[in-house]
Image (tube, helix red, strand yellow):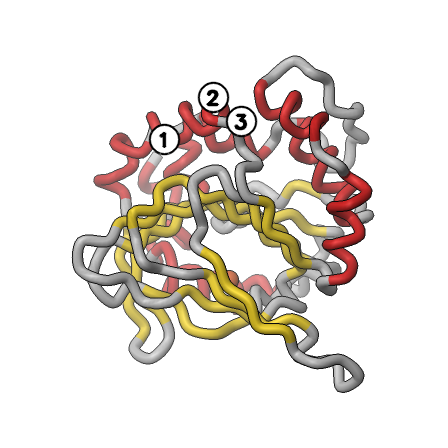
Amino acid sequence: MSSTAPTAPAAPDSPLARRIAELDLEALRTRFRDNDEFIAIPGFMPAAGLEPLLAALPALEPRIHRNFIPGHKKGGSTSRYDLDAVAPAYPAFYNDPALLDFLRRLTGQDLKICPPDDPHTYALYYYTEPGDHIGWHYDTSYYKGSRYTILLGLVDDSSCRLEWELHREDAGRETVHGGTALSPGMLVVFNGDKLWHRVTPAAAGDRRVALTLEYVTSHAMHPLRRFVSNMKDAIAYFGFRQVFARGARR
Ligand SMILES: [Fe+2]
């Protein structure tokens, strides 16, 4: 599939497309802009759309890579390569023309799907052990353009909260603090270089699974930044084998 092909307006031929058609896009666009490119939309994904994503979770369990960076993050992840291998519902969702058309209209950007060698294109984050969390950070774009992060709540039997600070870098505006549980079906969309955010630590017995998607405005990336990005993904998320030797798993 071409990453730059224009998509048709959402057609009412799937539960997700029907849901999108019901949304007040102009109100969402206004809120997204007022929040300096951030929005959380509870109940975005209908139950029928969540179902195939949830049904694929058991097949992914053996592939979860646990990571721990003292003082910054702890949790589990599965990369796009694992999702491609055993959970085709995830790439299908990522490439859904209705979703991409919605995101382009929400952001006002000609969003492109990521290149096939980006392990973060779509991935799952697991917060399933006590203390699993990620500290305050930006989702820095290693591409020459902007990087947009999309989060979709899949499972949330947890006390974890996604917390954020809006307008943090804008001396002319007061910083706005916010937070929410990432309830199943909730969609969060933000410009990774603008939203300062974290996920608070899980308690014993918690289980939280979130899907993350990444879209960009340019595929261009300096080779050195590609190396830095791969190192970050290997250490903090998916492991060296997934990022640098994924052919060995196929
Ligand atoms: Fe993040």
Q: Give the numbered dot on residue 54.
A: 1
User: Residue tagged by mark 2?
Assistant: 48
Would residue 115 be seen by someone viewing this image from the given angle? Answer: yes
Q: Quadrant of the C terminus?
A: top left
- Horizontal side of 126 relative to 53 (left or right) equals left
Cβ at disc 2 under 8 Å from ligand 1: no
Q: Give the numbered dot on residue 213.
A: none
- Give the crowd class for mark 2: few <14, some 14-19, many >=20 residues within 10 Å: few
Of callouts 1 and 3, the N-terminal one: 1
- Give the crowd class for mark 3: few <14, some 14-19, many >=20 residues within 10 Å: few
- Give the crowd class for mark 1: few <14, some 14-19, many >=20 residues within 10 Å: few
User: Residue tagged by mark 3?
Assistant: 92
Q: Quadrant of the N terminus?
A: top right
Q: Which quadrant of the figure has residue 132?
A: bottom left
Residue 185 percent across, percent down from the top left: 48, 38
- Horizontal side of 51 relative to 117 (left or right) equals left
Q: CA distance from mark 1 to mark 3?
A: 14 Å
Q: Nearer the viewer, mark 1 or mark 3?
A: 1
Of callouts 2 and 1, the N-terminal one: 2
- Amino acid type at circle 1 is Leu
Q: Nearer the viewer, mark 2 or mark 3?
A: 2
Q: Nearer the viewer, mark 2 or mark 1?
A: 2
